Image (cartoon, rainbow, N blue to C red):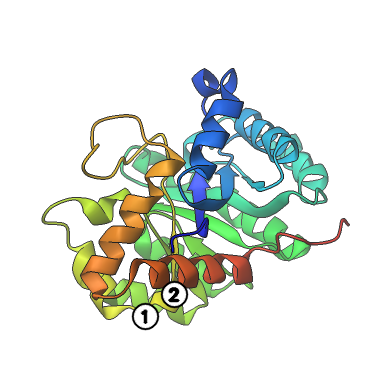
Amino acid sequence: MVMNMLIDTHCHFEDDQYENSDEFIELAFKHQLKRIIISGYDIKSSELAVMLAHKYNEVYATVGFHPHCCNEIDDSSYNKFDTWLCDDKVVGVGEIGLDYFYDGDQKDQQIKMFKKQIEIAEKYQKPVVVHNRNASHDIYNILKDSNVKGIIHCFSDDANMATKFIEMGFLLGIGGIITFKNNRLKEVIKSIPLKYIVLETDSPYLTPEPFRGRQNHPKNLTFVASAIAKIKDIEYNEVASITSLNAERLFDFNRDLC
């Protein structure tokens, strides 16, 4: 029997979805989802994530500043975390990290902002959700000198890098890419125990096959779970159950206020 047991550990809620939030959320819970975490990436999206988390019982938020925001954030912006991270529906700091694909000329600014948000996560003892694009070496070196745990969002490195992050206590966020043809991530999934994996959609981005090219939605998490089950030759419900337990252990969905 298939039950609502999946947890989407990373999705975004865009402006054009706001007026249809009830429909958007209800559709997800009709497709086997147990919980949804909406990830902020700047001040506006983080505040929206918190608001929606309070509107729906099984919706939670992470808050943070994406590396693309490094020129928009000043010292006063970090004061937001004092309110956000004392909210019982905010379960982590993210989406944070480094992105050298588009913004390679802003490495110093990105690293400064990344380290600052890691310090905040350490202060509040919250997990981090890490964006990594073409920056694995710097991210690894920064994280190994910190005292945080969390998720490497949209993991797409090789098995060697996967092992390094896992040994630091991080989980790997696996989404729609795992359904794409000829992706090297399938070999990584074969070699990594399921206890180190959590599921995510990153919606409205990275829509899985067979809907690639369309707007993504948390309801499509079932395709990610099915792909992992096929790759590892295990039952779908085992993937759903274990990955959700992994998310439950990382995120304190029932924590006390500050």
**Image-quadrant location for residue 120:** bottom right
Judge left or right: residue 40 versus residue 174.
right
Q: Is residue 111 visible?
A: no
Marks 1 and 2 in Cβ contact (< 8 Å): yes
**Image-quadrant location for residue 2:** bottom left
Q: Is residue 4 visible?
A: yes
Extreme right residue here? 258
In the rendered image, residue 256, in percent from the top left (x then y), is placed at 85, 60
Crowd tier of the residue under label 1, counting other residues whose Cα lies within 10 Å: few below 14, some 14–19, many 20 or above: few
| Alpha carbons under labels 1 and 2: distance apart | 6 Å
Q: What amino acid type should be assigned to the residue bearing mark 1?
A: Pro
Q: Depth check: 162 or 120 in front?
A: 162
Q: Which mark is residue 173?
A: none
Query: Going 36% across and 37% down the picture, which residue do you hit?
Result: 205
Crowd tier of the residue under label 2, counting other residues whose Cα lies within 10 Å: few below 14, some 14–19, many 20 or above: many
Q: Secondary structure at mark 2?
A: helix
- Residue carrying label 1: 193
Q: Depth check: 68 or 61 in front?
A: 61
Query: Going 76% across and 39% down the picture, which residue do you hit?
Result: 80
Q: What amino acid type should be assigned to the residue bearing mark 2?
A: Tyr
- Residue carrying label 2: 196
